[in-house]
Amino acid sequence: MVKKRVISLQSKKRIEKLIRKGIDEGAKPLADGRYARIPSVDPNSDIARTEIFGPVLSLLAVNTIDEPILLVHTVICLFVYQ
C-alpha cells in the first residue's frame, strides 16, 4: 500500500493501518505509486483527524466557501492548498 520509504517499518505499519481504517470508514484511496490520495474523507474520521507523517494526502470535499472555516474548528489537522 505505502510504496515510498518511511522512517521505519513501525511507521509504515501505522500508516497502512490508518489507510485501512479510512477505507473501512468509507474513504476510497487512489494510489499512484508515489503516495496515497484519499479524496472525500469524512471530517469525523480518524484519517481526517490524525497527522499521518507519511506519503498520504487526505482530501475533504466542501460545497460552500464557508465549510472550510467550519472544518477548521472540527478537524485537528487541516491543510488548505489553493
Image (spheres, rainbow, N blue to C red):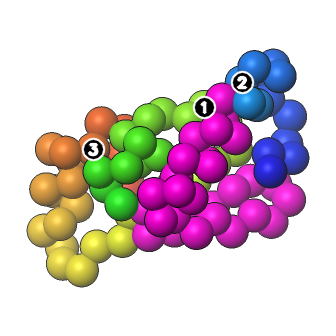
Look at label 3 and name its amino acid. Val
The relative height of residue 53 versus residue 40 in the rendered view (above or below) is above
According to the image, label 3 marks what residue? 75
Q: Which quarter of the figure has residue 52?
A: top right
Label 2 or label 3, whichever comes before in sequence order: 2
Q: Which residue does the image show at 68% across and 68% down from the upper left?
A: 30
According to the image, label 2 marks what residue? 11
Q: Are marks 1 and 2 in contact (CB under 8 Å)?
A: yes
Is residue 55 rendered magenta in the image? Answer: no
According to the image, label 1 marks what residue? 53
Label 1 or label 2, whichever comes before in sequence order: 2
Look at label 2 and name its amino acid. Ser
Of residues 37 and 81, the one drawn nearer to the viewer in this rendering: 37
Count of all numbered marks drawn on residues in the image = 3
State the SS at label 1.
Answer: loop
Q: Is residue 61 left or right of residue 75?
A: right
- Report the span colored magenta: 14-41
State the SS at label 2.
Answer: helix
Q: Which residue does the image show at 86% across and 59% down from the upper left?
A: 33
Is residue 18 rendered magenta in the image? Answer: yes
